Image: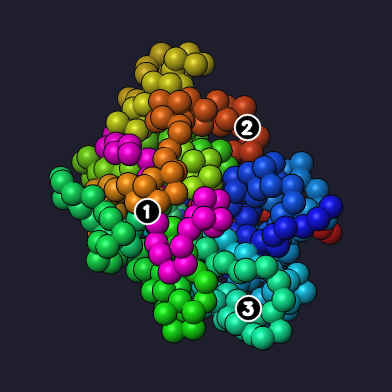
Amino acid sequence: MDINRRILVTGGCGFIGANFVRLLLREYPDWRVINLDKLTYAGNLQNLEGIEENDQYRFVKADICDAAAMDKLFVDEQIDSVVHFAAESHVDRSITGPAAFIQTNIVGTFTLLEAARKTWLNNSWKGNDPRFLHVSTDEVYGSLGDTGMFTETTPFDPRSPYSASKASSDHLVNAYFHTYGLPVVITNCSNNYGPYQFPEKLIPLVFHNSMNGKPLPIYGDGKYVRDWLYVEDHCEAIVEVLTKGKNGLSYNIGGNNEKQNLEVVTRICDTLDAKIGMPKSGNPRKELVIFVKDRPGHDRRYAIDASFIKDQLGWEPKVTFAAGIEKTVDWYLANQDWVASVVDGSYQKYYETMYG
Ligand code: NAD
Ligand code: TYD
């Protein structure tokens, strides 16, 4: 088989990364995919169950902060494309333990940029035109009031250790473009949902708790707004930017789908009630909602103006929120073993089963 791209996917055992690896293996058989993941608590090899290592796919357990390992991998595999997902990604964890966010999100991104710089901006590079795509978030732009939307020129105003670490990494990526001419693109996406999302994030947490009759904790007044995007739409947008984007640019990716948290939670509960019937208590699942102490520094509203990527690359979301929630609830219902193994921690033993 001729290989037309040698792509390093970092964090490919996480939520979005696993969906992305699956998309590549399905749609791009002539790309060699190297999935590099440290397998932190958020990395789960079961997210890629059924995928075998072969000419098209290799898994490497490593830390993106390990400079020697990154330098060697770039050379050994002649990596010509990077899609960089690996990160600490949960805002609540960044409040209780920010150090890992600084290390992975900032130092780790720097380490990868250095490996790319050394390999690609070197006269001996004989591979394809290279491209480094940094996957980032709309949270770098801060918090909106009732009106307005984030565009690519909105000034950064991060307010949590998570978003500050992602903003720092975006600045580093841009600096490598301007200073060294490294071929980079950045994507800033809104909140994703869909299969394989770790049940500490709102949507899978609500699924798990409501299936088990546990309270559904809503921070503050529940009127915080997020723009929700189905994960496969995000993955497709990333391929568009990787293959057709312009070096040095950032592309906002969003779902055109703003929802208050309480509305999202109610929708999941109602969908479950309709699909599998009322719980034993006989009460609708939405009655499990409890209002709890607010997250410190909680951003009020995120809203993405995704017109640039639509105008430039023709990408727009395909999956409506109604269809996406149906698909997501169906997936979690069909994969309750996956949820159970994540919740009881047994998924972390899967690596030993697979790799000894
Ligand atoms: P996730 O937490 O589910 O997965 C992160 C993955 O990175 C895990 O597999 C983990 O093992 C791996 N990882 C963490 N530290 C590592 C390290 N030092 N070295 C190697 N691997 C490491 O995250 P996610 O929700 O899939 O998000 C992926 C990326 O997309 C992140 O960069 C995040 O900032 C960005 N993003 C996420 C969302 C969202 O809604 N989830 C929205 C916009 C952008
Ligand atoms: P989350 O899924 O953590 O994503 P992010 O903080 O990156 O947007 O949270 C989504 C929204 O849901 C956010 O406004 C915080 C809120 N939330 C709750 O109200 N209760 C919860 O238990 C969680 C995890 C989140």
Distance between mark 1 and mark 3 Cα atoms: 26 Å
Q: According to the image, label 3 marks what residue?
A: 120
Specify the amino acid type for callout 2: Asn
Which disc is residue 335 wearing? 2
206 to 254, vertically: above or below: above
Rendered location of residue 118, percent (x, y): 62, 84
One can see residue 351 in this view: no
Rendered location of residue 78, percent (x, y): 73, 71
356 to 344, vertically: above or below: below
Residue 260 placement: quadrant: top left
Q: Secondary structure at mark 2?
A: loop
Q: According to the image, label 1 marks what residue?
A: 252
Q: Residue at x 45, y 32 (%)?
A: 319
Specify the amino acid type for callout 1: Asn
Query: How many neighbours does mark 2 have within 10 angstroms: few (below 14), some (14-19), or many (20 or more)?
Result: few
310 to 142, vertically: above or below: above
One can see residue 6 in this view: yes
Q: Could you tell whether 291 is left or right of 50 in the image?
A: left
Rendered location of residue 144, percent (x, y): 20, 52
Q: Secondary structure at mark 1?
A: strand
Q: Is mark 1 within 8 Å of ligand 1?
A: no
331 to 114, vertically: above or below: above
Q: Nearer the viewer, mark 2 or mark 1?
A: 1
Q: Could you tell whether 156 is left or right of 127 in the image?
A: left
- Residue extent of the magenta highlight: 238-262
Query: How many neighbours does mark 3 have within 10 angstroms: few (below 14), some (14-19), or many (20 or more)?
Result: many
